[in-house]
Image: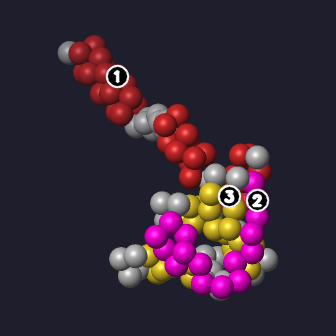
């Protein structure tokens, strides 16, 4: 009886230890990484308090309201979508052709080029 109780306690302890482990995190899919690379080939970015348009490694300052892939981009960093939504970029952020904001765009641009 004691042996059976002890065996049951050991099995119960092993079962609880097995379920307490953290699940493994998935590695980022190569597809997503490829999409990010494609998205960064052209973007608008807030840098030094000014807006810039990046395309094919070339930087152009945005000094007037500009249309960028169906959204209006203002020199102050405001981006207005066709559906009426708007967002304002902060220093170092960029907005790609699909209206997705990336936080550390400068590093992503360096990796690309």
The residue labelled by disc 3 is 55
Going from N to C along the chain, the mark reached first, 1 or 3, is 1
Mark 1 or 3: the one toward you: 3
Tell me: residue 25, above or below residue 80. above
Q: Which residues are magenta?
A: 57-72
Q: How many marks?
A: 3
Magenta stretch holds residue 44: no
Q: CA distance from mark 2 to mark 3?
A: 5 Å
The residue sitting at the left extreme is 1
**Residue closer to the observer: 111 or 21:** 111
Q: Give me the residue at 41% from left, 80% from top.
A: 85
State left or right for residue 88 relative to residue 81.
right
Q: Are marks 1 and 3 in contact (CB under 8 Å)?
A: no
x and y percentages locating residue 60 in the rendered image: 75, 69
Whether residue 73 can be seen here: yes
The numbered mark, 2 or 1, whose residue comes first in the sequence reads: 1
Q: Is residue 13 visible?
A: no
Describe the element under mark 1 as helix, strand or loop. Answer: helix
- Which image quarter: residue 58? bottom right
From the image, state whether disc 2 or disc 1 is nearer to you. 2
Which residue is located at x 28 percent, y 14 percent?
3
Q: Residues within 10 Å of mark 2 (few under 14, many from 20)?
A: few
Q: Secondary structure at mark 2?
A: strand
Color style of the picture: secondary structure
| Pointer 2 with pointer 1, Cβ within 8 A | no
The quadrant of the rendering that contains the N terminus is top left
Residue count near mark 3 (Cα–Cα under 10 Å), binned few <14, some 14–19, many ≥20: few
Q: Which residue is mark 1?
A: 10
Q: Nearer the viewer, residue 102 or 97?
A: 97
């Amino acid at each position: 009886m004691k042996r059976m109780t002890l065996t049951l306690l050991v099995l119960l302890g092993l079962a609880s230890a097995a379920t307490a482990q953290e699940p493994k995190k998935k590695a980022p899919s190569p597809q997503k990484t490829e999409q990010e690379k494609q998205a960064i080939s052209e973007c608008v970015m807030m840098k030094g308090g000014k807006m810039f348009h990046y395309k094919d490694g070339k930087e152009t300052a945005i000094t007037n309201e500009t249309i960028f892939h169906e959204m209006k981009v203002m020199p102050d960093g405001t981006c207005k979508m066709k559906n009426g939504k708007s967002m304002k970029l902060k220093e170092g952020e960029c907005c790609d052709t699909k209206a997705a904001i990336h936080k550390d765009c400068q590093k992503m641009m360096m990796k690309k080029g």
